[in-house]
Amino acid sequence: RWKKLPHVLSPRQVKALIEAPLTPSRAPSAGARHADIEAALRLRDRVLLDLLYSCGLRATEVCLLCVDDVKPTLGVVLVNGKGDKQRLVPIGKPAMQAAQRYLDEGRAILAGPGRDAGRLLLSRTGRPLERVAVWQLVKRYATVAGLQHVHPHVLRHSFATHLLAGGADLRVVQELLGHADIGTTQVYTHVDRSRLK
C-alpha cells in the first residue's frame, strides 16, 4: 500500500539547523544579565536540537528529560517514552559535549528557585520547557538555517533514515525510537532510496 512518506532532512541540512543557535541573530543588549540569559538560551537550544536529532526524541520526550537522565559516563540518555516506557538511547559525542557545556555554563543562569523540577531544558523564566515552545524553537531555527516545513518530528524521521542509510539494523532503530511495532519503523526503509539502489 502507498503511504505518505515522512519529510527528511539531509545530513548537511541537519548540521545547518543544529548550528543555527550558535550564531546570535539578535542585536546585542546593553544589560550584562540579558546577554548572559541570551547566551544560556542559545546553549539550551543547541542541546535541544542535538537531542531531537542525535537521539531521535519526540518533542514531549525531550521536554521530560531531567538532568539525571543524561548519563555522561555511559554515553546514554534515559528516555521516558509513550505509555511510560523507558529506554536507553546512545548520545553522540557532539550532543554530549553540548549538553555538558549547557549544564556547566547555561542552565544555572536560567534556573529559578524551586521551579525547574530537575528538568534538563528550561525556559527563559526558569520553568521546564514545554512542547509548544519546542515546536516554535525548531521552526525559528529552521528559518535561520534557510529550511522550510521543519518541525521536531522531522528531526526524528531524519535520525531514523540516516541510521538505516548508514547500515543500522531495522530492529535496532525500532528500539532506539521506542516503537512497539516494527511496522511503524519500516516506513523509513522506503524513504532512503540510496540504500535500495
Image (spheres, rainbow, N blue to C red):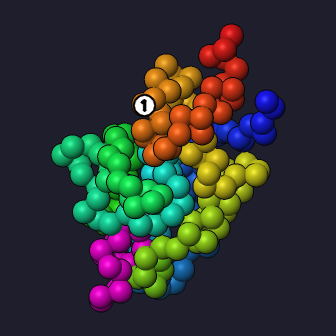
Residue at x 62%, y 59% (from the top left corner): 138
Q: Is residue 34 above or below residue 174?
A: below
Residue 98: where, in percent of width, then height? 37, 52
Residue at the top extreme of this rendering: 197
Q: In this view, does 132 lie above or below 31?
A: above
Q: Give the range drawn in magenta.
A: 107-122
Q: Which of 184 and 33 is in front in this view?
A: 184
Residue 88 seen by the camera? yes
Residue at x 66%, y 39% (from the top left corner): 9
Magenta stretch: includes residue 163: no
Judged left or right of residue 117, residue 62 is right
Mark 1 lies on residue:
172
Magenta stretch: includes residue 109: yes
Residue 82: where, in percent of width, then height? 47, 58
Total of numbered circles in the picture? 1
Judged left or right of residue 121, residue 58 is right
Q: Is residue 72 above or below residue 168?
A: below
Q: Which amino acid does label 1 sit on?
A: Val
Image quarter where the C terminus lies is top right
> How would you rate the neighbour count of disc 1 (Cα within 10 Å): few for under 14, some for 14-19, many for 20 or more?
few
